[in-house]
Image: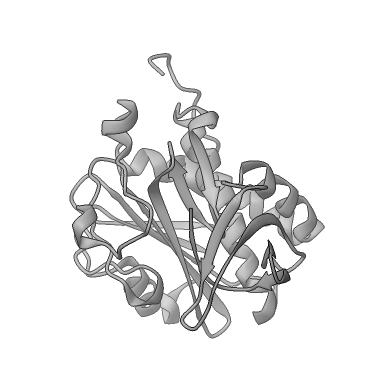
Amino acid sequence: MGDALPPAAPWPADTGCTVLARVDSTMAEATRRLPTLAGPEWILALRQEAGRGRQGRGWADPPGNFAATHVFRPAQGLPERALFSFVAALALDNALRDLGVPAARLSIKWPNDVLLDGGKLAGILLEGAGDHLSIGFGVNLAHAPDPADLVPGLHPPVALAAATGVRVPPEDLLARLAPAFARWRAQLDDYGFGPIRTAWLARAARLGAEIRARTAREEWRGTFETIDATGALVLKTAQGTRTIPAADVFF
């Protein structure tokens, strides 16, 4: 990983970029900017003070970490927009590999957490706003949160710098993430979910192994068999095959 890195791909055409020194939340900023957006936009914050993850959980963003939101108008209807979880995860996986992180050390936990050596390196959050979709990316580039501050049982956080020695300014990650996202979005637009699903399964953590999937009311334990054509988790349990559209996954 000491070798010179290849140059980043060109920035996506007709896509804007805003870099903010400080903001409450890039997701909130994306919502505030919706009335004036002329096209797709990336919003990067060098310091995010009120980030959030899934189910309203907090997301810590010390200086040096990556906090960005991409907001755009997808061609897909509301039921299909969840597929962008997989597009976003593949794009981030590609961007990190392009920055020199070995592919063998990275994996994707269903549906879109990026793991490094089994620890949580990054989280991705999707929120709809009318005909727009906002996708928030949080990556522990320089610092990982204290595990004591997290929900018990979730994957321990890991920071890229400490785990790999790779030190990446947030702007450099964005320069690789934006083109990667544009490529995978074009795949989804042109060919549907099939190629995305195949590529995602090739990067999936614990595929073919036992996992637990927990919702607010139930928990299932079984073998992670695949994801279906909607992106739902397919779990083979002692009670039969379960198809689970949304859950927290533990292993």
Residue 23 in picture, x, y percent from top left: 22, 66
Q: Is residue 12 above or below residue 68?
A: above
Q: Dividing the picture into quarters, in which one does residue 230 lie?
A: bottom right
Residue 1 in picture, x, y percent from top left: 41, 19
Residue 247 in picture, x, y percent from top left: 53, 71
Q: Residue at x 25, y 47 (%)?
A: 144
Horizontal arrangement in the rendering, residue 104 relative to residue 198 (left or right): left
Whether residue 75 is visible, yes or no, is: no
Horizontal arrangement in the rendering, residue 190 relative to residue 231 (left or right): right
Residue 156 in picture, x, y percent from top left: 33, 49
Q: Residue at x 30, y 63 (%)?
A: 152
Q: Residue at x 44, y 42 (%)?
A: 118
Horizontal arrangement in the rendering, residue 93 relative to residue 1 (left or right): right
Q: Is residue 131 above or below residue 178?
A: below
Q: Is residue 142 above or below residue 83?
A: above
Task: Tell me how the rendering is colored.
Answer: one colour
Decide which of 25, 54 is in the foreground and name it: 54
| Numbered marks: total | 0
Horizontal arrangement in the rendering, residue 43 relative to residue 92 (left or right): left
Whether residue 16 is visible, yes or no, is: yes
Q: Residue furthest top?
A: 3
Decide which of 105, 15 is in the foreground and name it: 105
